[in-house]
Image (spheres, helix red, strand yellow):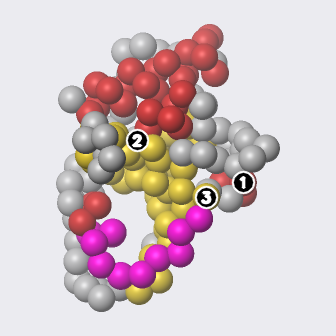
Amino acid sequence: MIYRLLFCLIAFSAINMKAETADSSRTVQVGDSVFIGICPAKGYKYIQYYRKTRFPNINATYNKTTGEDFYEYFFLDGDFDVKILPCEYASKKYRILSIKTLMDKQTGADRPVMFLDLGPHTVAWVELSGAVEQLEIYLE
């Protein structure tokens, strides 16, 4: 279900950004890449930068093929530097580590998120609905 939602959202973005190269039959999954769009004047609204700085369980792992358990592996313990994604990450493509649907604590609604590999111990947390709508991420 999340893959279909993601596909629809990103396909819409790709059609708006590059109509001549959009392929409506493409699906995205863990291991594929997406582009982070041009940095908005006020910064990214739907993409956060997470750098893990403390690793209490150095033997933890997750399924790198499916992305299953990535959220638990990366976020459930340790310490982080968190900020809005810096503009230096703009206009480049990044590999998808995981796609997950979380529940919005305020509304109870589904909240699809994607995690992108920014480098060692560093990921982008992408709020899919808003990021695609605002063209903060797209497919080439």
Question: Mark 3 falls on what kind of element?
Answer: strand
At 39% from the left and 46% from the top, the residue drawn is 114
Q: Name the residue under label 3.
A: 84
* Left or right side of 63 for 77: right
State how far apart marks 1 and 2 are (Cα): 22 Å
Residue 31 in the image: x percent, y percent?
A: 36, 46
* Left or right side of 70 for 139: right
Residue 19 in the image: x percent, y percent?
A: 61, 12
Question: Mark 1 falls on what kind of element?
Answer: helix
* Left or right side of 74 for 87: right
In the image, residue 78 sits, relative to residue 19, either above or below, namely below
In the image, residue 19 sits, relative to residue 11, either above or below, namely above
Question: How busy is the neighbourhood of tag 1: few (under 14 within 10 Å), some, or many (20 plus)?
Answer: some
Mark 1 or mark 2, which has the lower sequence index?
2
The magenta-colored residue range is 73-83
Residue 21 seen by the camera: no
Using the rendered view, name the quadrant where residue 24 is placed.
top left
Residue 56 seen by the camera: yes
Image quadrant for the N terminus? top left
Q: Which amino acid does label 2 sit on?
A: Asp
Question: How busy is the neighbourhood of tag 2: few (under 14 within 10 Å), some, or many (20 plus)?
Answer: some
Q: Mark 2 points at which residue?
A: 32
The number of numbered badges drawn on the structure is 3
At 61% from the left and 58% from the top, the residue drawn is 84
Residue 49 tag number? none
Q: Name the residue under label 1.
A: 87
